[in-house]
Amino acid sequence: MHTQKHISVYILCGGKSSRMQTEKGLVVFNNKPFIEWIIDAVKPISNQIYLITENTDYSVYNYPLLADIYKNKGPVGGIHTALTHTNTQQNLILSCDIPMISTHIIKRYLINSKVINSNIAFVSDSTRDYPLIGMYNANNLQRFEEAIQQNHLKLMRLIQASTYHRIQVASRDFEALNNINTPNELQNLIQRKP
């Protein structure tokens, strides 16, 4: 399998997980923690995979763990940490709560699309944007740094103040984007995908 040398992957495993009431990335679906589904989806894409978390429970996966540079700054802080760390121009940023994501979806909409070299590109279904399934150029570092300094932590607002591409996903692929945030959503997923 051909991996991309010019893309780094950062999976945001942080967050309070207050609605799930447990560490979201380690929630098990179909005998595998969420994080494993996501790692399996990105392994064919890049061999530079990093987990943004301080939770050493993730060390069993043998990928580098990166602590947030600025604590408790949500996704903006996580992306800032990724952009500070990266040595590639393009960086795939994923949340840890999307167990239905696949290599095919990531390649189709982000890696192989014309937006690969854009400033920020993320996927969207007909009603919701998914900025944590997106590509972020390293050039955004200063913008994220300034946002944190000013405590402007709403990610979509920060993106909308920049140049970005919103990539519309085909309806047959909507399910792959679903964030699983609560025990109820997990149960619904299990019932749909036994």
Image (tube, rainbow, N blue to C red):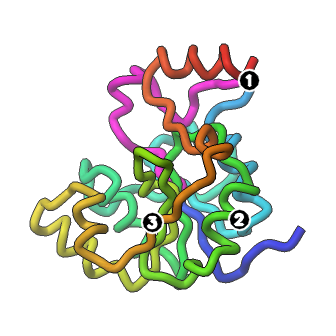
**Is residue 167 placed above or below 174 in the rendered structure?**
below
- Separation of marks 2 and 3 at Cα, in angstroms: 15 Å
The residue drawn where x is 44% and y is 72% is 165
Is residue 125 depicted above or below 21 in this figure?
below
- Does residue 26 show up magenta in the picture? yes
Name the secondary structure under disc 3.
strand
Dominant SS of magenta comes to loop
Mark toward the viewer: 2 or 1: 2
Q: Residue furthest left?
A: 150
Type of residue at label 1? Asn
Q: Earlier in the sequence, mark 2 or mark 3?
A: 2
- Mark 2 burial class by Cα count in 10 Å: few <14, some 14-19, many 20+: some
Res. 17 visible in picture: yes
Tell me the magenta residue range.
Answer: 11-30
Q: Which residue is mark 2?
A: 107
Percent across and percent down for residue 134 are 50, 63
Vertical placement of 144 versus 155: above or below? below
Look at mark 3 in the image and give the residue it sits on: 166
Which amino acid lies under the numbered mark 3 shown in the image of this protein?
Arg
**Disc 2 and disc 3 in contact, CB within 8 angstroms:** no
Q: Is residue 10 left or right of residue 138?
A: right
Where does the image place residue 53, in percent across and percent down from the top left?
Answer: 45, 49
Q: Residue drawn at (22%, 55%), measured in percent from left and top?
A: 154
Quickly name the residue at label 1: 30
Lower position in the chain sequence, tag 1 or tag 3: 1
Task: Tell me, yes or no, if residue 65 can be seen here.
Answer: no
Say which of 105 and 93 sits in front: 105
Structural distance between the alpha carbons of marks 1 and 3? 31 Å
Residue 155, given in percent of the width and then of the height, sits at 29, 58
Q: Is the residue marked by circle 1 packed among few (<14), some (14-19), or many (20+) residues within 10 Å?
A: few
Query: Badge 3, how many Cα within 10 Å: few under 14, some, many 20+?
Result: some
Q: Mark on residue 45? A: none
